[in-house]
Image (cartoon, grey):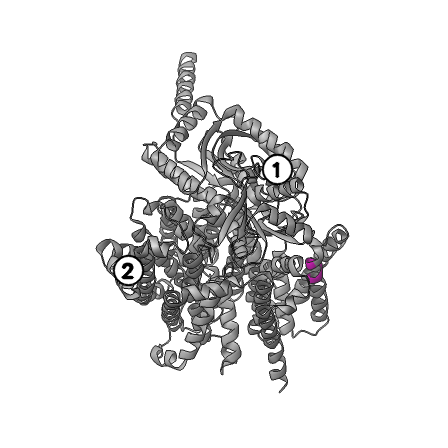
Amino acid sequence: MIEKSFLFFLLLFSVFFLFFSGINLEKTDVFLIPFIYSIVLLISLLVLFFKKIEKTSEESKLSKKTLTIISITFLYLLFLNFYGFLMPTLLFCCITPISLNNKNYFTIGILSLVWTFGIFNLFKYVFQITLP
Amino acid sequence: MKKIFLFLLFSFNLFVINSQADFPTKPVKIVVYTAPGGLIDVSSRKLAKIIKEQDFPKPIIIENKKGAGGLIALNHVIKQKSDGHTIFALTSSVISKVVGAGKESLFSELKFLGRIVKDYECVITNKKSNLDTIEKVIDQAKEKPGKQIWLGPAAGGTDHIFAKKVWNATNIQAKWVPYKSGGEAIAALLGNHGDVYVGNQQDVIGRPDLQVIAIASPDSVKYPNNFLNAGFTDLKSEVLWRGFAVKKGTSEETLKYLEKTIKLAIESEEWKKFISQGQMEGIFETGESFENAVKAQIETDKKYL
Amino acid sequence: MFFTNLLTGFELLFTPLGMGMLILGVVLGIFIGAVPGMSPSMGVALLIPISFGMDPTFAFILFVSAYQAANYGGSITAIAVNAPGTPSSVVTAIDGYELTKQGRAREALNTAVISSAFGGIVGVILLIVFSASIAKIALKFGPAEYFALAFFGLSTVVAFAGSNALKAIVGVLLGLLVNSIRLDSFTGDERFTFGIIELYDGISFLPAMIGLFALGEIFYQLESYNSEKTKFLSLNKTKSLISNFFNSKLTLVKSSLIGTFVGVIPGAGATVASFISYGEVKRCSKQKDKFGKGSLEGIMASEAANSSSVGGALVPLLALGIPGSATDAVLLGALTLHGLVPGPELFQTNVSLVYGIFAAVLFANILIIFFGLLGNSLWLQVLKIPKSIIYTLIITLCFIGSYTVQNSLFDAWVCFAFGILGWFLKKYKIPSATVVLGLVLGQMLETNFRRSLIISGYSGFLTKPICLIFLILSLFSLIIPVFSKKT
């Protein structure tokens, strides 16, 4: 199920490229090579799509753990965009281990602080790169 | 209550005024639109070093923001505050690329500070080919119309537009084959994978196999092989310039301070040596003169792009 | 004459300042290489301000030792946490991380150290002895030859294909298609960029790679995350390193040679070198099946090649004044900043600098062995930290690294997006390395194809000897595995 969905997504991807290369092809042959790539990709994907896949129960599901972490990471990036580096990273470093069932709150706290501020200052003073 | 409020307002104003007068208040960033190593990058680093040695009160950091021929760097600079702490190091190529992308409206957000280097555009060939004069190049182009290969950096920049101007003036048709950087194009020329390369005098320094066969400088005495002497008055003076801009809205005081700082730096011995070593021409053109030159360039570029 | 120059170089190196710069360069280089997102070119650029005021010879001892060390440094994070610190260690991650999962991280890390040093030394020896002649060969590479080389590089995809060739092809095509999102360099037309300025130069390679490998792996591992088994790394007893190397000496030599020659060609650098080397070594290996599942030979192939490419890349820089790699471009800039004229003239005007560079690269490799082996014991301790924390730190490091490439948050998003893609690729068993191959070689393939068409048309590809050789080699690469499977 997952595999088929992923393949389907990739199919959409190749069709997207195919379409946009196709409509521009008349104007300029700049799109010729991507057009060829997308055709070959489409064909390969179709072959794979109609092949039989062995099903294993674990791979048919989307792991909740992964999705949780992905969502947390997404939020982290979002916050990074709006609030800069320090606070979001600090929060992220605290929340993520906890959501992975790490109970050493004290260690997590200290590590988050050290890591966040350490990295920030390392980059700022040694490499002259200011994180957002 | 009212008195306290007025006092606070007054102090705040004083604080704000003082902050503006106290430029710089934090490290100044020069945003360079190429990867480290390119000439604008090297020039900026050199200048930054000199300025620092002239007791500039805060660190000067070079920030490389490469991409899209300068559009990404330009976009970034525009998003910063107009407090003079972000300076855009740009060249005439950036102007052309931005015009080519149809985004010249972005320039209205910039205040052009000044340009400090002028580099005459040159036509360069490999000594191993027999193209040692511009006339021979023209002859060869006429023998194989549309097939003569001109090498240079990405399409749409100063070098490409100069090539088009040359083709126009000499009435030839040729093909522009772009490379990611001048260096790669030079490598191709050294290997004889092209007929002509467009660049600057610096490109032949240290490369004994290459020669400048024509230069778009008006000085016919210093450069006997300039386009003027060859009879092409349209190509009297074509330059690649390098300069700086800041975001529009930067205060007059800050602008004057920056101008003064840069002027001091380019008058130093070290800068002059750097310029002469690269066979460039040092200039200092600021304010309206610079802005007008940019406007004129935008108009010309539109014709060729 | 040559030996006296070399001795002068060594003399300068073995001064307190010289050794100081060498050690500083190696240590910083290893660190820069290890941090995902910080590339060797960026690292050397960061060192430039430190060098102002220094005699150029010592400045360059610093730069080149950092350059050499950074190419090694990438392997550390590649092996330990599947987060290649430099693009050139992507291939190392493939087998390296597998070994880590098998508890053989120490072996993998030590192999990487020795292979890097070996490759680096071969590279610099070839540089010292043959630079002029090698440079001439490099110049013969025109657009057709570059296209053929890129095609050959792509043909090594079979080496990364694993069990399913079709999936590998899908992977490569994905990489190629994504790589075609950019402003066309010939005409300036927008290709799939839809007005988004950040895409005008294409999707940044480093963030995409970091996302695919590091984030993708973390997301995948989280599926089987068990709160009880939290230790990231368990270590088995290590086997004898020396016998491993002795048995694979041919691999090391071959990889080093491939790396040097690919490095010489301007525009083809350490990353391309490591892919081609891996492909070639696997093709000739008696233990083909181990590749991709934890082959020490695979690590040797990749690391020896990416390190020897440094010596190779210095060839065009010193012999012709042309940058052979992105880091070379920075070195060129540094030469100009220090008032020197790059190119063959350096051999006359500044002999001590040139031979100082040779000596520095040579000894940097020896220091790499020292610091590398020392460091390995350290990294292995760090990896004993619980997974929950390591994952967190790696994720933050990935985003930081992606950001530092161009000081752009867009790149951090790219990293994230590719992380999700990487996760799905792993689930569906499409090797991420194939996508990376497409991303790395896409531009080289396409732009040189088009350049060659402009210059010499379709017949150009068939009439140029070097081009033809590589195209034929590519066909062999692609076809032979098909035949060997059938027998």
* Left or right of C381, for residue B137: right
Q: Is residue C336 above or below residue C231?
A: above
Residue identified by numbered label 1: B232
Magenta span contains residue C359: no
Q: Position of residue C399 (x, y in %)?
A: 48, 51
Q: Residues within 10 Å of mark 1 (few under 14, many from 20)?
A: some
Residue at the extreme top: B3
| Quarter of the image that includes the C terminus of chain C | bottom right
Tell me which amino acid carries mark 2.
Answer: Gly
Identified at 50% across, 49% down, the residue is B211
Residue that carries the numbered disc 2 in the rendered image: C9
Residue at horizontal 34%, vertical 52%? Answer: C349
**Pick the front one: C453 or C87:** C453
The structure residue drawn at horizontal position 36% and vertical position 59%, both measured from the top left corner, is: C30
Locate residue A130: give its quadrant.
top left
B66 above or below C165? Answer: above
**At 60% across and 49% down in the image, what residue appears?**
B136
Q: Amino acid at mark 1?
A: Phe
The part of the chain drawn in magenta is A33-37
- Which type of secondary structure does the marked residue at label 2 adopt? helix
Q: Quadrant of residue C352?
A: bottom left
Which image quadrant: the N terminus of chain C?
bottom left
* Circles 2, 1 touching at the beta carbon (< 8 Å): no
